[in-house]
Image: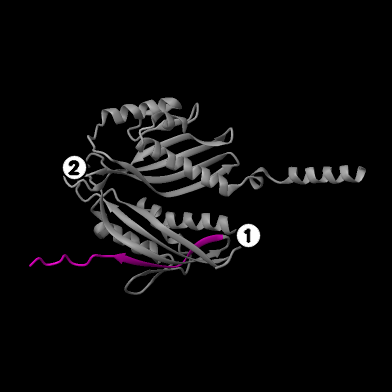
């Protein structure tokens, strides 16, 4: 029995000696974070604004392309208004196309990501899918209760600025 | 193809290298761009001689200053169809593709595909960092417009 307890103690010490970042499953975390980044567009594309707000948890901050800011569930409400107003007068169906994703970890429960997207909308004349907006995302991500969420997402528009002064 | 202990983190690092190629150009960081090729990495256009190491940055600086890339701002690289495989733990190959997106109409800033290209890469780990050993760029072109009868 004493030998068993000694073995158990050594095993526990060994587990405790492994750094937290080595104990986690990075491949799983990368898959979950990728799914989070995809869910951002998928919820907007399906007009699931409640689901969109949940991606930010209670206090995640969303800074939209125009600099407007919302926190948590309010992010969903903000996007509900944006799509209801339809300032660009775009047709449907429209969808997000994501690319250039890079994820780095700051610790076992914190990560950063950069990525880009095109917002594809039908051309009014031809109905062909056409890129209307391009955006760059800078994300701070956090794992809360086992789930990866946006702690902060900043959207930077890379097109459709007013023409530069000549 | 090999499988090795650090394969997953190597894939992550190589993916970051492939994305940084475009990101450096998009932010006009030509010195940073050249570092992706180390001292002797070759950047090979489909025709002509390869450009080596630090000279790759100077070549791209010139292209962006005087070539067609200078006129349609903003512009950016969009990467897709990435494949990576390993020949040894320190040597890998990759193929991928890219759209170079521009906004030629400065009134509407409407996005347009300026160039489509594929990349054929040899990648090497040097001093713990992955870099291009050789990158071959092959533009995809439709050729001249068909003459209508």
| Residue shown at 41% from the left, 25% from the top | A74
Chain letter for the residue marked with disc 2 in the picture? A
Tag 1 residue: B5
Tag 2 residue: A124
Q: Secondary structure at mark 2?
A: loop
Residue count near mark 2 (Cα–Cα under 10 Å), binned few <14, some 14–19, many ≥20: few
Q: Which residues are magenta?
A: B129-149
Could you tell me residue B139's position as x and y percent?
A: 31, 65
A90 vs B139, nearest the viewer: A90
Could you tell me residue B1's position as x and y percent?
A: 54, 68
Could you tell me residue B49's position as x and y percent?
A: 35, 74
A150 vs B20, nearest the viewer: A150
Q: CA distance from mark 1 to mark 2?
A: 52 Å
Q: Quadrant of the N terminus of chain A?
A: top right
Residue B48 in the image: above or below residue A28: below
Residue count near mark 1 (Cα–Cα under 10 Å), binned few <14, some 14–19, many ≥20: few
Q: Quadrant of the C terminus of chain A?
A: top left
Chain letter for the residue marked with disc 1 in the picture? B
User: Does any portion of residue A125 appear in the rendered image?
Assistant: yes
Say whether residue A108 is left or right of residue A99.
right
| Residue shown at 47% from the left, 40% from the top | A36
């Amino acid at each position: 029995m004493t030998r068993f307890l000694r073995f158990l103690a050594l095993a526990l010490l060994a587990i405790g000696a492994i750094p937290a970042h080595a104990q986690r499953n990075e491949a799983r975390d990368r898959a979950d974070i990728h799914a989070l980044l995809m869910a951002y567009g998928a919820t907007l594309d399906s007009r699931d604004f409640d689901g969109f707000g949940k991606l930010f948890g209670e206090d995640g901050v969303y800074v939209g392309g125009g600099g407007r800011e919302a926190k948590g569930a309010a992010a969903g409400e903000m996007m509900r208004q944006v799509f209801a107003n339809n300032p660009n007068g775009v047709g449907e169906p429209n969808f997000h196309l994501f690319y250039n994703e890079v994820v780095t970890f700051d610790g076992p429960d914190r990560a950063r990501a950069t990525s880009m997207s095109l917002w594809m909308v039908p051309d009014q004349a031809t109905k062909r899918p056409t890129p209307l907006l391009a955006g760059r995302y800078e994300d701070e991500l956090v794992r809360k209760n086992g789930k990866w969420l946006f702690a902060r997402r900043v959207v930077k528009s890379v097109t459709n600025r007013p023409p530069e002064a000549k | 193809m090999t499988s090795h202990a650090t394969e997953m983190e190597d894939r992550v690092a190589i993916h970051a290298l492939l994305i940084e190629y475009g990101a450096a150009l998009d932010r006009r960081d030509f010195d940073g761009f050249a570092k992706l090729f180390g001292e002797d990495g070759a950047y090979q256009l489909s025709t002509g001689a390869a450009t080596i190491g630090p000279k790759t940055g100077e070549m791209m600086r010139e292209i962006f200053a005087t070539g067609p890339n200078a006129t349609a701002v903003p512009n950016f690289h969009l990467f897709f169809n990435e494949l990576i495989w390993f020949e040894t733990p320190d040597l890998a190959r990759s193929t991928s593709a890219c759209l170079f997106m521009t906004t030629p109409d400065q009134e509407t800033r409407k996005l347009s595909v300026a160039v489509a290209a594929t990349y054929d890469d040899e990648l090497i780990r040097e001093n713990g960092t992955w870099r291009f050993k050789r990158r071959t760029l092959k533009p995809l072109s439709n050729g001249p417009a068909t003459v209508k009868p």
